[in-house]
Amino acid sequence: MHLVGTQVIPEQGGKAGFTVEFVGEGGEIVSVSMRGDAAANLNRLNAIEKAQAVMRELASADCSTIEDSQETSKIHRSARGAKDTDEMERQLDEGLEDTFPASDPVSVTVSTIPTDRAKNGQP
């Protein structure tokens, strides 16, 4: 990748951290998101340097030690994606129960307030 530009994007004004994007000549973009800490060691001036350090560490990491166990690679499909109608019905019922007061129909009451018309003999 031939680097043609970098971009530093602050998260919540830099308080939550920064995302550094490295832009390649062919339109490739590599993003490194880093969270800020209480000591404010990460800032706009050193974000690129720290992102490069993260990428160097990643490049030298031994990925063969990562196990592909069923627990870590298990994919959870949504009820809609799995076409699980029972689960979708359960989720719908739960949602309706959670919004019950808001789903009650509006009650309309009519109150009669006596006026002076009855005393004056007007209809």
Image (cartoon, helix red, strand yellow):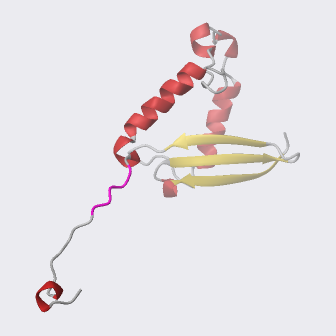
Left or right of residue 57, residue 15 in this image: left
What secondary structure predominates along the stretch shown in magenta?
loop
Q: Is residue 43 magenta?
A: no
50 or 74, which lies in front? 74
101 or 21, which lies in front? 101
Query: What's drawn in magenta, residue-wise?
Result: 105-109
Where is residue 101 shown, x and y percent of the image?
34, 45
Q: Residue at x 69, y 47 (%)?
A: 21
Relative vertical location of residue 59 with respect to residue 65 in this rendering, above or below: below
Q: Residue furthest right?
A: 26
Relative vertical location of residue 29 with respect to residue 79 in this rendering, above or below: below
Where is residue 114 shown, x and y percent of the image?
15, 78
Left or right of residue 67, residue 95 in this image: left
Q: Quadrant of the C terminus?
A: bottom left
Q: Residue at x 46, y 46 (%)?
A: 41
21 or 115, which lies in front? 115
Q: Quadrant of the N terminus?
A: top right
84 or 55, which lies in front? 84
Image mark count: 0
Q: Residue at x 61, y 8 (%)?
A: 70
Where is residue 89 shown, x and y percent of the image?
53, 26
